[in-house]
Image (spheres, coloured by chain):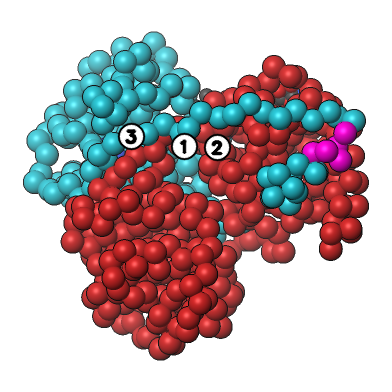
Amino acid sequence: MKILVCISHVPDTTSKINFTEGDTKFDTNGVQFVINPNDEFGLTRAMWFKEKQSASVDVVNVGGAETEPTLRKALAIGADKAIRVNAEATDGFFVAKQLAAVVKDGGYDLVIAGRESIDYNGGMVPGMVAELTGANFVNTCIGLEVDGTSATAVREIDGGKETSNTSLPLVIAGQKGLVEESDLRIPNMRGIMMARKKPLTVIDAVDAAKETTAVKFEKPAPKGAVKLVDADNIDELINLLHNEAKVI
Amino acid sequence: MSVLVYTESEQGKLKKAAFEVASYAKEVANQLGTTVTAVTINANDTSELGTYGVDKVLNVSNDKLNNFNAKAYAATLHQAAEKEGAKVVIVSSSADSKSVAPILAVNLDAGYASNVVAAPSNTSPFTVKRTAFTNKAFSMTEINSDVKIVGVSNNAFGLVENAGDAAAEAFAPNLDDSLFGVKVDTVDKVTGKVTIADADIVVSAGRGLKGPENWGMVEELASVLGAATACSKPVSDLGWRPHGEHVGQTGKPVASNLYIAIGISGAIQHLAGINASKVKVVINTDPEAPFFKAADYGVVGDAFEVVPTLIEKLKEFKANNA
Ligand SMILES: Cc1cc2nc3c(=O)[nH]c(=O)nc-3n(C[C@H](O)[C@H](O)[C@H](O)COP(=O)(O)OP(=O)(O)OC[C@H]3O[C@@H](n4cnc5c(N)ncnc54)[C@H](O)[C@@H]3O)c2cc1C
Ligand SMILES: Nc1ncnc2c1ncn2[C@@H]1O[C@H](COP(=O)(O)O)[C@@H](O)[C@H]1O
């Protein structure tokens, strides 16, 4: 089985979010970038397929040279090979078209992406890749087993989960649950050394239109101070929620 | 030319989110000077859609669609959009709509903006406000393609009545077997419980509750309020609560009217995921807990005393206001 794990390169969850150039660009100053958490779950599941079912695992990112340390980290965790499509990732559809070209070119059976990137939160790339490549698709995936070309996938739905039978080629959008938090791996020294020697191929983008443009960013309005209610005066809390906030 | 809206149902009954996206579609249609056509799949009574501005309903009734199927649902909407000549398609932020929209975007060669929180600020270029960086910011996004898909965040636009009558019409999409490459085997769903996605009120608890055995009062508070229950990440990592309840940046997003956080410190990753909620209440023993900076109302106190009192007082309040 040939697996491709899509990796988006995102600000660490603790990052302060600021913008520059008249609020048109994300300010990367002082920001630490990481493998998108949803992709980390997917990569970990891919490692399981590699170890238990002899799958090959490649990772891919659509981005500039600055994303290479993130791809190297994925190699250090255990991926075999990395591909970077050299283009700025500003539109989900554009990114999906790049990834679809990589999938077709590499003949991948299973594409593991994440539910959403925690930066732009598009939640669209995996479904688009599936449709562009004619693969089956399972979103918000919290369980995946593959047996030959058959697969069983669990999708998180509102208020529960749904188990489906499907087949390769398949694209899933993973999230926590696909593996447990405790299964996540931190690259060790040996992995880091080996990653330096693994291939990281840079390819040119295919022609594709950008269907959306983020023209300006805004930060939420600053919050007013909290109204404290005495623990002995819960009636007051109910009164505020009913008469002031009007939520009960 | 009309605006197409996918109005979801659950076991034949239209969901509340369906009326919200219908309200949104009506606003877009007003801006564009056109009408609203809704699509329903195996819904029983769709007359109420008229109340929220829908002019015409395409009712799809097909046993093959009893279970959700992303490609078949997308094909249905694709064919409806072509039939109506729709240039704008509106969907919700439910798990199902979020699975369908990217496929539909490819089918229609349409740009898709998800998590949209307000009506378009402009229709040419078509510009919407969406959340980004997990609620730490908003992005004004232009959709440049000819056909556009807008995914509306839950509870962001609200329900707007535009009383009218929706003319119902049967619609039979052509569904090729090749669409059904994913076959649902089992659906495991808690019935009779409000889901986080649909809830007006969410009651959430964290590690401050010490152990899973103490969740009875959280469940009870939720039940008194008709709320969904949720939890912080460590609580689900520890197995105290199911993963489906984990909210935050790496869990489910919450955009309820009221979010009550009990024994949750308010870490940045937690707040990012719940910040879209309109009113936030925190109950925590530590007045320095960061959640107090993010909340509207706070009680510094022990959850094991405050929550039972709150339940009791709310029961009285509900009885008096019934
Ligand atoms: C990559 C990454 C992603 C993450 N994503 C998420 C996410 O999506 N969601 C999420 O929630 N977290 C997330 N986290 C974890 C986050 O950083 C915090 O660790 C977590 O939110 C803390 O959970 P908590 O508030 O329940 O526990 P704690 O931080 O341990 O807080 C417990 C609180 O309970 C209070 N308390 C104790 N006893 C009582 C009592 N008797 N009555 C009332 N209050 C009491 C304490 O004062 C304290 O404030 C993420 C972390 C990382 C690194
Ligand atoms: N620039 C990118 N390069 C590689 N994979 C990406 C990129 N952007 C998004 N993805 C994948 O698509 C998933 C969903 O991203 P998004 O649709 O942007 O929210 C991510 O979790 C990744 O797996």
- Judge whether B237 appears above or below B57 on screen: above
Which chain did the renderer colour cyan?
Answer: A
Q: Which residues are magenta?
A: A233-237
Which label was assigned to residue B275?
Answer: 2
The residue that label 1 is drawn on is B135
Q: Colour of chain B?
A: red
Q: Earlier in the sequence, mark 2 or mark 1?
A: 1
Q: Is residue A128 visible?
A: no
Report crowding for label 1: few under 14, some 14 to 19, many 20 or more residues within 10 A (C-alpha): many
Three-letter code, disc 2: Asn
Which is more foreground, mark 3 or mark 1?
3
Report crowding for label 3: few under 14, some 14 to 19, many 20 or more residues within 10 A (C-alpha): many
Three-letter code, disc 1: Asn
* Residue at image location 43% in from the left, 55% down from the top: B152
- Judge whether A60 appears above or below B252 on screen: above
Distance of label 3 from label 1 (alpha carbons): 12 Å
Of all chains, the one bearing label 3 is: A
Give percent across and percent down for residue A34: 38, 24
Give SS at disc 3.
Answer: strand
The reply to whether dot 2 and dot 1 touch (C-beta < 8 Å) is: yes
Give percent across and percent down for residue B142: 25, 48
Q: Is residue A176 visible?
A: yes
Three-letter code, disc 3: Phe
Which label was assigned to residue A217?
Answer: 3
